[in-house]
Amino acid sequence: MVRSAFLVGKSIYSRRAQALAALLKQMRKDAGLTQAELASRIGRHQPYVHDYEAGDRQLRIPQIDEIARVLGTTTHAVIGELDKIAPPDEGPSETEEA
């Protein structure tokens, strides 16, 4: 099951959102695709890809699913990589709550 809270915090400029944008950009480049090519394959325009790679657009799980599929991977794998480079913030531990 993919966690839906992959972006911690509401700001699209959160640490996790920035890491996701950088990860997807690198994955696109590794796949040898331009922004325009990726956009075409997911049925969007190039500015859409530019905006999320620049951190100006927040992606939701369905959009990550589309992008991951085109890049030959899964959302689960993308979030797994994201967890490695930008682990999710943990809630307070039991000792911190006391």
Image (tube, rainbow, N blue to C red):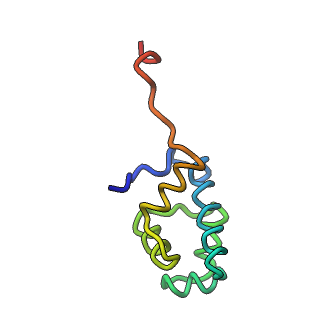
For the point 57% across and 58% down, which residue is it?
20
Seen as rendered, the residue at the extreme top is 98
For the point 64% across and 80% down, which residue is it?
35
Seen as rendered, the residue at the extreme left is 1
Q: Quadrant of the C terminus?
A: top left
Horizontal side, residue 48 vs residue 6: left or right? right
Q: How many marks?
A: 0
Looking at the image, residue 65 lies above or below residue 4: below
For the point 60% across and 50% down, which residue is it?
85
The one of 23 and 62 positioned closer to us in this rendering: 23
- Residue 36 percent across, percent down from the top left: 63, 85
Horizontal side, residue 2 vs residue 73: left or right? left
Q: Quadrant of the N terminus?
A: bottom left
Looking at the image, residue 34 lies above or below residue 30: below
- Residue 16 percent across, percent down from the top left: 57, 50
- Residue 61 percent across, percent down from the top left: 41, 63
The one of 62 and 23 positioned closer to us in this rendering: 23
- Residue 38 percent across, percent down from the top left: 57, 82
For the point 52% across and 82% down, which residue is it?
44
Looking at the image, residue 47 lies above or below residue 17: below
Horizontal side, residue 41 vs residue 34: left or right? left
